[in-house]
Amino acid sequence: MSGLAFQGLKRGLAVVVAEGRAVAPLASWRAPFASASDSFTEKIWGTQPHPGWEPPKKLPVPPAIENGKMVAIDPRVIGGKKCYPLIISAVVPRPIAFVSTVSKDGQQNLAPFSYFTAMHDPPCVVICVNRAAHRNGGKKDTMANIDETKEFTVNVLSEWFLEQANHTCGNYDEDVDEMALSGLTKEPSLKVKPPRVKESAVHMECKLKHKYETKGYNGEDTATIVVGEIVMFHVNESVAKKTPSGNTYVGLEELQPISRLGGNTYGRSRECFDLARPDRDWQNR
Ligand SMILES: Cc1cc2nc3c(=O)[nH]c(=O)nc-3n(C[C@H](O)[C@H](O)[C@H](O)COP(=O)(O)O)c2cc1C
């Protein structure tokens, strides 16, 4: 294996050894907190796919991919709506924002959104709320409420309440309170009106910072991209961990996050591994 060998997990710290000498810890701040006696850790953490790889060696590509022809698909030819199954199956796995909102009249709403990403300085979330086909292209309740009150909460999805979360995504009427319908528990927020979902281990109270209305190829309204600034985090102490410098982070094993894949498929983060980033030195070798 050309001098490089994987030495396995030692107290959660994966190490690559070159000619008997440790060169790169594969885990950074996770390692000190993972213990071999942690059953979740044993279940989840595995080895990187190719521990003996050295740049610029080529890695083997599966024959079906190597010999397969690329099919070119022009979205303007097939139309934006027909891109839906392609996009949601190709851009995977996606995290899921479980978004709670309230209308100006106090009607509460809850729905999952996997067109979802985030940034940290300032801490913001980004979700994309499509127009509703069942409302002839009208707004979903989540978007109508954000437009009215400029506030929402994002609650992280975990395995232990997934079926309840999934139940909130039906095309229900606007006067339906999905939190009550699916048996979830409301927790009052500190800085915004929409409640949080008590069953979730990480909550983010958000205020609308920007929004961008998108148009389809025929000029019709198709979606709104919402940027919300996080004005308060809530982290359940059972998932909260500290980096060596004292910053809070969330333990993967404890969080049991669920992601969305294509169609109605969900995923668990059940086999993970750490991989060190290359040193700048590599550019001169
Ligand atoms: C896992 C999952 C992810 C979803 N992601 C999105 C999304 O990113 N954008 C969107 O517009 N709808 C998404 N949906 C559909 C909405 O949740 C659904 O339309 C919901 O009824 C909207 O509710 P509302 O009208 O109460 O806002 C998703 C559904 C599921 C189950």
Image: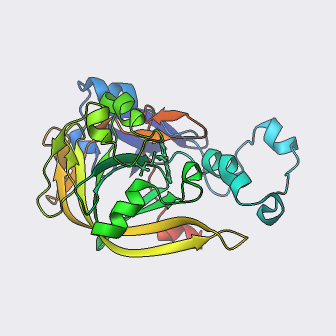
Q: Nearer the viewer, residue 245 or 145?
A: 145
In the rendered image, residue 26, in percent from the top left (x then y), is placed at 40, 47
The quarter holding residue 223 reads bottom right
Q: Residue at x 23, y 51 (%)?
A: 203
Can residue 22 be seen here?
Answer: no
Q: Nearer the viewer, residue 58 or 117?
A: 117
Can residue 175 be seen here?
Answer: yes
Quadrant position of the N terminus in the picture: top right
- Taking 223 as reference, is 159 left or right? left
Q: Nearer the viewer, residue 128 or 30?
A: 128
In the rendered image, the vertical position of residue 82 relative to residue 179, given as above or below:
below
Q: Nearer the viewer, residue 172 or 236?
A: 172
Q: Residue at x 30, y 42 (%)?
A: 177
Quadrant position of the C terminus in the picture: bottom right
Tally of numbered discs: 0
Q: Residue at x 49, y 67 (%)?
A: 224
- Taking 106 as reference, is 167 left or right? right
The figure's colour scheme reads rainbow
- Taking 231 as reference, is 159 left or right? right
In the rendered image, residue 256, in percent from the top left (x then y), is placed at 33, 35
In the rendered image, residue 205, in percent from the top left (x then y), is placed at 22, 60
In the rendered image, residue 20, in percent from the top left (x then y), is placed at 44, 41
In the rendered image, the vertical position of residue 70 relative to residue 237, given as above or below:
below
